[in-house]
Amino acid sequence: MANAPNERTGRRIQSVEIAFTILDAVRKNDRPSITELADELGHSKSTIYSHLQTLESEEIIVREDDGYRLSLQVLDMANDVRNQVANYDVIVDAVDELANETGEIAQFGIEEHGQVSYLYKARGNQAVETASRAGGKQPIYSTSLGKSILAFLPPDRQEEIISKTTFERKTPKTITDQASLYEELEEIAERGYAIDDEENIEGLRCVATPVRNGTSVVGAVSVTGPASRITDDYLHGELAESVQRAANVIELNTKFS
């Protein structure tokens, strides 16, 4: 008798995969037509049409003229997701306050599928804009949010993520091998916070600290700013302390809410 597929490597259902690639294409494009979706995704028009009909009947997409867009039901689902993964209102208040205090970009992220996913982002009065946004993802090994989470995960989960990571040199300072990453994770675990020293985007430095619930890691909170303002003394001193205070506020309010 064949072994049952486990939850991470189980059998894949092609029709579901096609549906999700269609949703992703609809999300990224401005009301694409059936022909445009078929050309982009490499499926026949009949296949695309059948899936669109199903998605429309489930009210996940909306047909407008000759094109399609995601429905507001997706937004409603996103709101539910935010409240399921963390104490969202507490996070918003703490991250907003951190952004106002530092004047920079403050963010909260969680680990999903071996990457860091952004849950919330706030901008201070002198913030330099970045490409990150709620729902977006970045590599776990080149971001302070990702590394601060990774350093405090259980060893088996940490090893699982790192073993499956494909390292890409995003800047000259990016970590590109497992040994260097493990070495840095040890340092992060000792000092309690992680830094991104222009490792993900040249010209930007970040500091992040994990938010924990007992022994588990809920996520992490960070501040990002230009290297011209984020000096070494500020990064490892006042800024790291501010981020750690914000994480502590989230932890306490989550614990007693």
Image (spheres, grey):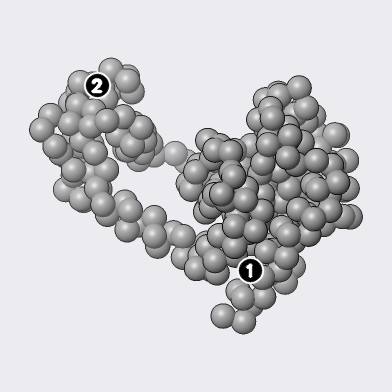
Secondary element at image label 1: helix
Question: Pointer 2: residues within 10 angstroms few (<14), some, or many (20+)?
Answer: some
How far apart marks 1 and 2 lie (CA) works out to 45 Å
Q: Looking at the image, do the residues carrying marks 1 and 2 touch, with CB atoms under 8 Å apart?
A: no
On the image, numbered disc 2 is attached to which residue? 36
On the image, numbered disc 1 is attached to which residue? 250
Query: Quadrant location of the C terminus?
Result: bottom right
x, y percentage for residue 255?
A: 64, 77
Toward the left, the furthest residue is 65
- Residue 95 visible in the snapshot: no
Toward the bottom, the furthest residue is 256
Q: Which mark is residue 18?
A: none
x, y percentage for residue 220?
A: 66, 56
- Residue 138 visible in the snapshot: yes
Of badges 1 and 2, the one in the foreground is 1
- At a point 77% along the width and 36% down the height, the residue shown is 197
